Image (tube, rainbow, N blue to C red):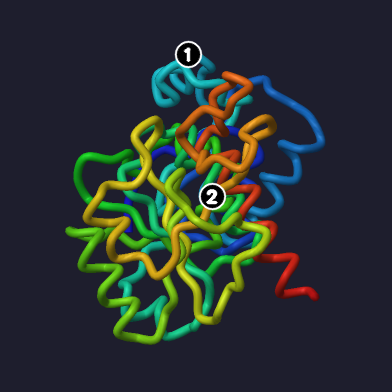
Amino acid sequence: MIVSPLVGIHPVREALRAGRALDRVLIAKGAKGPRLDELVELCRERKIPVRYEAREQLDRYGSGAQHQNVVAFGVTERQASLEQTMATGGLHIVLDGVEDPHNLGAIIRTAHAAGAAAVIIPERRAAGVTETVARTSAGALAYIPVVRVVNTGRALEQLKANGYWIYGLDERGTVTYDRVEFTKPSAIVLGAEGSGLHEHVAKKCDFLVRIPMAGEAGSGQGQSGKGQSGVASLNVSVAAGVVLFEWKRRQGA
């Protein structure tokens, strides 16, 4: 579990609603409004101290971020081991070196909305869970576990050994995301911005799937390539949304 500042009304409210352990909540002196009143009431219900401090102090805690007069300290991230999350049999999102914290936060938010069981990130050479990630996830960190692994390839091997089918999103994919059959339990692997999946990670996937771009005329273009229209393909967090909600739609069907 990580202790770090949580910035903004929505992330703090979601953390409170999810029952996450917060050490204290700071509100800027003189700040008023119904959303702040709601936060104060939630803190009172959960016996979490509320302190009123100068706005300049909140600016320092928030490192320049738009804190909306609210900063909280405490455990803002659900962590779990891979063994724990695998036992659920739910969808796992594996990130192979995503470096932009905004992309990581957006993927965590989308993963939670799509009903994923966990997001797996490497400990090194990738974005970690920061205040920016927490803010971009819009409170989803309070609900979906983030699993840190030393080696992404080994994590995929462990998933496969426990019956998971691995689907890598990659421009080399021979089947499109809307035609592949998702077999439960599933894990979807997303590569780094620009470079996509590392070769050794791609080799551990059972299927490589792609998102076709307009104008590619059947050529194998996907997450990080260019179609014949010359327009770069989707940002990794947008690509995640496309594939995860296709997976979610299939579950509903």
Q: In the rendered image of this protein, does residue 49 appear above or below residue 252? A: above
Residue 222 visible in the current orientation: no
Q: Residues within 10 Å of mark 1 (few under 14, many from 20)?
A: few
Residue occupying the point 47% across, 53% down? 173
Percent position (x, y) of residue 129?
Answer: 37, 44
Q: Is residue 154 visible?
A: yes
Q: Residues within 10 Å of mark 2 (few under 14, many from 20)?
A: many
- The numbered mark at residue 209 is none
Residue 84's x, y, as percent? 37, 80
Q: Which is more N-terminal, label 2 or label 1?
A: 1
- The three-letter code of the residue at mark 1 reads Glu
Q: Above or below — where is 65 with respect to 100?
A: above
Q: Which residue is mark 1?
A: 56
- The front one of 172 and 2 is 172
Q: CA distance from mark 1 to mark 2?
A: 47 Å
Secondary structure, mark 1, is helix
Tell which of 68 and 148 is nearer to you.
148
Q: Quadrant of the C terminus?
A: bottom right
**Residue 183 locus on image (x, y percent):** 55, 79
Task: Check disc 2 and report the residue beneath it.
Answer: 210
Identify which residue is drawn at 40% across, 25% down.
61
Amino acid on which disc 2 is placed:
Arg
Going by the image, does 53 lie left or right of 162?
A: right
Q: Is residue 225 above or below residue 139?
A: above
Total numbered labels? 2
